[in-house]
Amino acid sequence: MQAIILAAGQGTRLRAVSPSKPLTAIAGRPLLHRILDNLAEAGITRPLVITGYRGDEVARAAHDWGAETLFNPRWAEPNGVSVLAAALRLDPQGALLVMSDHLASPGVYAQVAQAEPGAALVLGIDRRLGHPWADESDVTRVATRQGGIIAIGKGLGTYDAHDCGVFRITPALMEALAGLDQPGLSDGVRRLAARGQARVTDISAHDW
């Protein structure tokens, strides 16, 4: 399976630690390399890294690992624009979509990759609300019903899960984002959710 890794943003939340979010050292290795390692362990072996801010450095690290890259010249815009940058490179059968600041165990990637074949979009969610690893003030919140997403966003007042930042996507997400001006990823998910096309899989048994 293909994986698209969003690594174009400025990473302001990690700026005090590292000038580049994907290159932040985790136990002596770049965060990006650890994400790519875990994807490969899960059998996801065709990574495409979307670069932007400090793009040459991030691309060099990606190429050192053996991943392909694609530069998004509109990297300062919301992350849905970086997703759209990959539209022409997206496998028609779909791909995993992951964030370069979310370190997930291989089990997360494998479960999302295999969940609900045929769904337009599947999001890995964690139902362990209040878990000490999650920053409740910043995490993206998800409200679900019968295995589907009914609402998503950081400002939700009523929710039953956290977005773990790992999706299985299809061209349907690209179509949803393409009709929006400067879209965030959650905007596209909301559009699919309104059509009943955004599903979830509970990855609470795994670390991320």
Image (cartoon, rainbow, N blue to C red):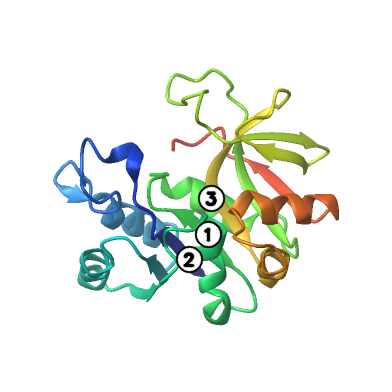
Percent position of residue 197, x then y: 80, 56
Badge 2 crowding class, 10 Å Cα cut-off, few under 14, some 14 to 19, many 20 or more, is: many
Q: Earlier in the sequence, mark 3 or mark 1?
A: 1
Q: Where is mark 2, residue-wise?
A: 3
Q: Which of marks 2 and 1 is nearer the N terminus?
A: 2
Percent position of residue 2, x then y: 50, 71
**Label ID, residue 82:** none
Q: Distance from label 3 to label 2 (Cα)?
A: 10 Å
User: Tags 2 and 1 in contact by the CB under 8 Å rule?
Assistant: yes
- Judged from the image, the secondary structure of the residue bearing numbered disc 2 is strand
**Label ID, residue 166:** 3
User: Tags 3 and 2 in contact by the CB under 8 Å rule?
Assistant: no
Say which quarter of the image contains residue 64. Answer: bottom left
Badge 3 crowding class, 10 Å Cα cut-off, few under 14, some 14 to 19, many 20 or more, is: many
- Judged from the image, the secondary structure of the residue bearing numbered disc 1 is strand
| Residue at image point 51% right, 72% down | 85
The amino acid marked with disc number 3 is Val
Q: Where is mark 1, residue-wise?
A: 97
User: Tags 3 and 1 in contact by the CB under 8 Å rule?
Assistant: yes
Between 27 and 20, the residue placed more toward the observer is 20
| Residue at image point 44% right, 57% down | 42
